[in-house]
Image: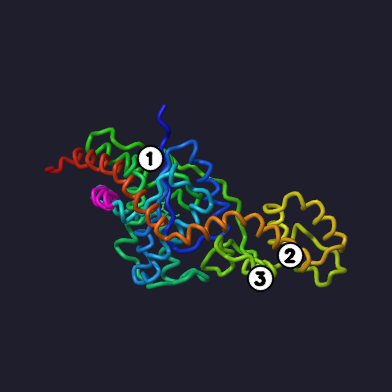
Amino acid sequence: MEKSLIVSGMRSTGQLHLGHYLGVLQNWVKLQNEFECYYFVADLHALTTKFDKTEDLKQNVEDVVLDWVASGINPEISTIYLQSLVPETAELHIYLSMITPQNWVERDPTLKDMVKILRGDLQNEEKTSNICSYGLLGYPVLMTADILTFNADYVPVGSDQIAHLEISRDIARRFNNIYKVELFKEPKPKLTQIPLFKGIDGQKMGKSFHNDIKISDSEEETSQKIMKAITDRSRLRKNDVGHPNECEVVFDYYKIFAPQKIDEVKYECENAKRGCADCKRELCKYVNEYFKEIRENRKNLQANPKLVREIILNGSQKARIKAKEVLAQVKDAVKMYY
Ligand code: TRP
């Protein structure tokens, strides 16, 4: 039996952090064996908001791919490609844009949030030029094109992407209705239960919040960041008893990175037998151990830029084979000249 097909992408925003690893990449790695997977770097989507900040674009693309491959996305099994190197997607986007009612995109709540951030209504996010472009309005349509380029069955995403995906399903259905074909499947979300992974300040981990630990950080950088993490705010001295459940970051990290230690940590903290600094120092060790192999993989791959390029170019070439087939069917359905 043929494997179901999965498409998912990430905008090329640069080095990924531990939240990406735990929330997305681990899941992608697992899916590789069960599904035919297409994973792409959404560099065109990055342009929807950063069109005037392109100086890091090339480096960002490579950084994302380095993080992926180091984390176990295997280019021999999955197709890793760059969105802009599969121009069939951009072409499909045009056809889909013609049949997408304007108000469908205008009422997309996820897009509304993006526009708010862009205009600076929400604090704490990085701002670039505060214009909402025609291209940004088409964000969910381009995303639909990404998915329909391979006529995907499933799209692994976090819950914040569900609104976009709802539009994708509507567009797929509308295309079939208008052109009286049964070409597109309605892509289903494959929701990952992403437990909120906190940054060192207790807020959601995010690059623009300046509270993240990168996959590519050195052990020293990682340790320095962890040593700054907030702990139980009510505990001022080592002799005070601690409350692990109110230790927003450190105790939560123990649960993930050193689950074998949590009983001991809990007991010692609650009985004032371990101080916060010692506790964090020990945690640094576990976090660094957890990412040791991935970081080594990353370093080795980074030392071979030719290979990285090859992964991107070969994957994109491979993706185009399937993309061309689908695009031909689309043009045929629309009754284009050739
Ligand atoms: N919008 C997604 C995000 O911000 C990235 C993305 C673009 C995507 N195209 C996609 C995800 C297609 C899944 C499928 O995370």
Secondary structure state at the residue bearing disc 3: helix
Q: Where is residue 77? Give x, y as percent.
A: 44, 42
Task: Give neighbour class at mark 1: few <14, some 14-19, many 20+ (Cα, 10 Å).
Answer: many
Q: In this view, does 174 lie to the left or right of 109?
A: left
Q: Mark 1 points at which residue?
A: 152
User: Residue type at mark 1?
Assistant: Ala
Q: Name the residue under label 2.
A: 280
Q: In this view, does 202 lie to the left or right of 15?
A: right
Q: Mark 3 points at which residue?
A: 224
User: Residue type at mark 3?
Assistant: Gln
Q: Does the magenta stretch include residue 91?
A: yes
Looking at the rendering, the stretch of residues picked out in magenta corresponds to: 87-96
Residue nearest the observer in this picture, 188 or 120: 188
Q: Residue furthest left?
A: 337
Could you give the CA–CA distance between mark 1 and mark 3, rounded to whole angstroms? 43 Å
Secondary structure state at the residue bearing disc 2: helix
Q: Which residue lies furthest to the top in this view?
A: 1
User: Residue type at mark 2?
Assistant: Lys
Residue nearest the observer in this picture, 12 or 304: 304
The quarter of the image holding the C terminus is top left
| Contact? badges 1 and 3 (CB < 8 Å) | no
Q: Where is residue 203? Give x, y as percent.
A: 61, 64
> Residue at point 38% right, 62% down?
46
* Mark 2 or mark 3: whose residue is earlier in sequence: 3
> Residue at point 71% right, 56% down?
254
Secondary structure state at the residue bearing disc 1: loop
Could you give the CA–CA distance between mark 2 and mark 3, rounded to whole angstroms? 10 Å
